[in-house]
């Protein structure tokens, strides 16, 4: 087990694709869907099992914006910054969440590893702008105050289930 990732499960996913190089992206997608990111150990295992260089695997993982090489929180918050959301003030929502989570510099994940904050170009819910998703669940017509209320509710729920 490495950073919460069971290498046996990683190998099952790779083997499920027949260890074929042309399935590398699908393999990475499935592993990330399960663990929310691709660790260095996972990328090395993919390279080994597919019989390709580690540099090739890293180049694929870093080329596609959808892949994350950093561990993410339990709740992945995406703030839409597409045109409709932007003009309806999505930036103050992002700033409020960032401040609430005490994120600094390029940091995206809260110190307690509960939340990861990201921006996206468009979530495709322009009529509901401004929009925030939490683990792909859409929250519409958000304000900075509603966003903080949502995070506090998630924290309470998480603490109750701990």
Image (tube, helix red, strand yellow):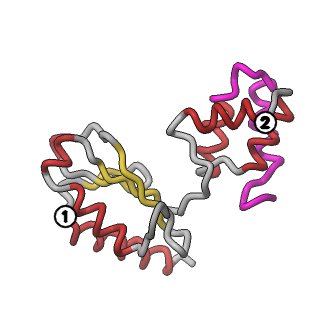
In the image, 60 versus 42, the foreground residue is 60
In the image, 156 versus 57, the foreground residue is 57
- Give percent across and percent down for residue 105: 45, 65
Is residue 6 shown above or below 13?
below
- Give percent across and percent down for residue 156: 42, 79
Question: Between marks 2 and 1, how big is the CA–CA gap?
Answer: 44 Å
In the image, 64 versus 155, the foreground residue is 64
What residue do we see at 21% from left, 72% from top? 145
Characterize the local packing of mark 1: few (<14), some (14-19) or many (20 or more) Cα atoms within 10 angstroms.
many
Secondary structure at numbered mark 1:
loop
Pointer 1 residue: 143
> Quarter holding the N terminus?
bottom right
**N-terminal label among 2 and 1:** 2
> Quarter holding the C terminus?
bottom right
| Residue 5 falls inside the magenta stretch | yes
Asked which quadrant contains residue 63, the reply is top right
In the image, 93 versus 20, the foreground residue is 93
What residue do we see at 75% from left, 26% from top? 17
- Give percent across and percent down for residue 90: 22, 55
Badge number at residue 54: 2
What residue do we see at 77% from left, 43% from top? 10
Q: Give the range drawn in magenta.
A: 1-25
- Give percent across and percent down for residue 119: 36, 50
In this rendering, would 75 be left or right of 90? right
Asked which quadrant contains residue 53, the reply is top right
Asked which quadrant contains residue 48, the reply is top right
Is residue 6 shown above or below 113?
above
Is residue 16 shown above or below 44?
above
């Amino acid at each position: 087990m490495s950073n919460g990732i069971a290498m046996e499960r990683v190998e099952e996913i790779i083997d499920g694709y027949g260890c074929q190089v042309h399935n590398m992206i699908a393999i990475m997608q499935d592993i990330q869907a399960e663990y929310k990111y691709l660790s260095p150990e996972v990328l090395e295992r993919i390279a080994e099992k597919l019989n390709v260089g580690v540099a090739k695997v890293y180049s694929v993982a870093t080329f596609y914006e959808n892949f994350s090489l950093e561990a993410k929180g339990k709740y992945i918050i995406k703030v839409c910054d597409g045109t409709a959301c932007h003009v309806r003030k999505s930036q103050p929502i992002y700033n409020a969440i960032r401040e609430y989570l005490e994120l600094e510099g390029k940091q995206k994940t809260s110190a307690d590893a509960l939340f990861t904050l990201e921006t996206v170009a468009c979530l495709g819910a322009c009529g509901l702008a401004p929009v925030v998703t939490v683990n792909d669940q859409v929250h519409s017509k958000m304000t900075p105050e509603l966003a903080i209320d949502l995070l506090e509710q998630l924290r309470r729920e998480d603490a109750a289930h701990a």
